[in-house]
Image (cartoon, helix red, strand yellow):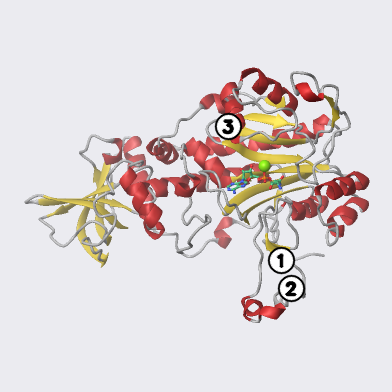
Amino acid sequence: MRRGVPRALGVRALSAPAAMPPTLAALRCNAERVLDEGRELANPPVTAHGWVVSARRQKTRTFLEVNDGTLGGDATLQVVLSGDVRDVAPGQAVCLRGAMKRGRGQRRSQRVELHADSVDVLADSDLATYPLANVMQRHAHDSAIVDIVRRESHLKARTPRFAAMARTRARMELAMAAWFAENDFCKVAPPIITASDCEGGGEIFRVVADADVRERDALTTFWSGHDAYLTVSTQLHLEAFALGLSRVWALCPVFRAEGSATNRHLAEFWMCEAELCWLPPDAAGLHRVLDCTEHVVKRALHAAWDGERAHDDMAFLGAEPHAAWLSAPWPRVPYTEAVRLLRAHHAAPPVWGDSLRSEHERWLADHFASPVFVTDYPSGGKPFYMRENRAKTTLTPDLDPERVGAEEATVACFDLLVPGVGELVGGSVREERLDMLRARMAHAGVQAAGLQWYTDDLRRYGGAPHGGFGLGMERLLSWATHTEHVRDLVGFPRVKGPLRY
Ligand code: 4AD
Ligand code: MG
């Protein structure tokens, strides 16, 4: 008989002796709730911590605006101190003791304020040299702040704009995690150091032990002569997890030695990847992966606007809610149709077989005025693991006048293109037929040696039909918040060039 472990362990049994002290957001929220309920504030003593954003002195009173990074948008908590308090200045970290009172200001953020009896300066700030001394209260997109924090990443978190971005990102990630959990996806931990280039794109960083570099003739001793890389995508390992757990996901940093300095590319970024088994055959399999993608992205978008603080953050960042994107189903267009559309309307269109350039991707998203799935791309140029479709595409004059009648292969894959950004998600059904997989690997020049665990074992021991996708978190955030450069929404962006941090 099993003993000792109760079926449901009460939260009370797990919780720590004392709850966490309230943040400024909690102090404000608790006080506002009392007012919302039509009651008066009972004014129990409270302790608050934060950084001074501004100080205004009058003869009988001093007003401080204080923030601790938990309020929405550029909101601050107004603090009223009696007397002319001389030694409090912007940038300082302070501890305040007092009581919450009904505020007298007009703005929503001024409904409640803190009347402080005491202020302790916990850490001073050298205003003469503080790069943010004079810019903190400027508009979120003010170029002076953008320039400063691009140079001084370590001060980014002090700016309302980056703080709003960080909170929004956290909300979106939490919502995605909730969607996955509700749908029985298990979060797994794939490796970051890998033995292969999953995408076969060659934009890969090598991992060598420092000691091996110093002893130049033994470059790969640490890995016993094997090559090691930073992962470009956790997909192959996720497939291994999925073929035992049915539905898995991961949110991991991935690395690409991208030479291109665009506003959408980073050398280190976070990819949310999911892999699911038991896909139905043929086109329905791909559409199941699309359904999953659409749900996850919609849930994340919804979370970005859900709640007062979230709303304040998004409004402050200058984002628009785009309610229609949340309610309407997103169009699904085969690549062949996309090429037809582009050839009919675009000034510099592709012919069938070309990869879509970012201007084409953006044109398509604008054309549909919605996120749009483009599916079933030509198999040439797509990674080896994508499943080849049975039906061939016969080229017609409107697809390529020079190759009319040619029979071309496509793969069961997709890109999700979104307005303003372009590609946000890429995914596919995985090739489960070993002979087809080997042919695609040979064609793409992918080294089969070392990948037998993936090619052979995962297929010959119950390799259920499966597929999945990868979503770039920074691109999702840049799309949702209307931020042009992904570098501006990452704390310490890694791009080709000098590395400071
Ligand atoms: O389209 P990608 O290369 O797909 C894969 O890596 C698949 N193995 C994913 C899978 O099926 N599990 O990358 C996925 C997404 C892109 O759509 C894009 O949003 C983002 O990752 N991405 C980048 N984001 C920032 N900087 C870069 N250099 C990026 N490269 C890709
Ligand atoms: Mg892609």
Q: Nearer the viewer, residue 437 or 395?
A: 395
Residue 450 lies, with reference to residue 272, above or below; the image says below
Q: Amino acid at mark 2?
A: Trp
Q: Nearer the viewer, residue 10 or 62?
A: 62
Residue under the point 69% across and 25% down: 338
Residue identifier under label 3: 359
Question: What whole-number distance in Å separates the C-alpha atoms at marks 1 and 3?
Answer: 35 Å
Residue 228 badge: 1
**Disc 3 crowd, CA 10 A, few/some/many (<14, 14-19, 20+):** few
Mark 3 vs 2, N-terminal side: 2
Mark 1 vs 3, N-terminal side: 1
Mark 2 vs 1, N-terminal side: 2
Q: Closer to the camera: disc 3 or disc 2?
A: 3
Q: Nearer the viewer, residue 73 or 96?
A: 73
Asked whether the beta carbons under mark 1 and mark 3 sit within 8 Å of each other, the answer is no
SS category of the residue bearing label 1:
loop
Question: What whole-number distance in Å separates the C-alpha atoms at marks 2 and 1?
Answer: 7 Å
Q: Amino acid at mark 3?
A: Glu
Asked whether the beta carbons under mark 2 and mark 1 sit within 8 Å of each other, the answer is yes
Left or right relative to 104: residue 498: right
For residue 369, say whether it is visible.
no
Question: What whole-number distance in Å separates the C-alpha atoms at marks 3 and 2?
Answer: 42 Å
**Disc 2 crowd, CA 10 A, few/some/many (<14, 14-19, 20+):** some
SS category of the residue bearing label 2:
loop
Residue under the point 52% across and 56% down: 494
Residue identifier under label 2: 223
Asked whether the beta carbons under mark 3 and mark 2 sit within 8 Å of each other, the answer is no
How far across and down, in percent of the image, does residue 205 sit?
A: 64, 61
SS category of the residue bearing label 3:
helix
Q: Nearer the viewer, residue 141 or 448?
A: 448
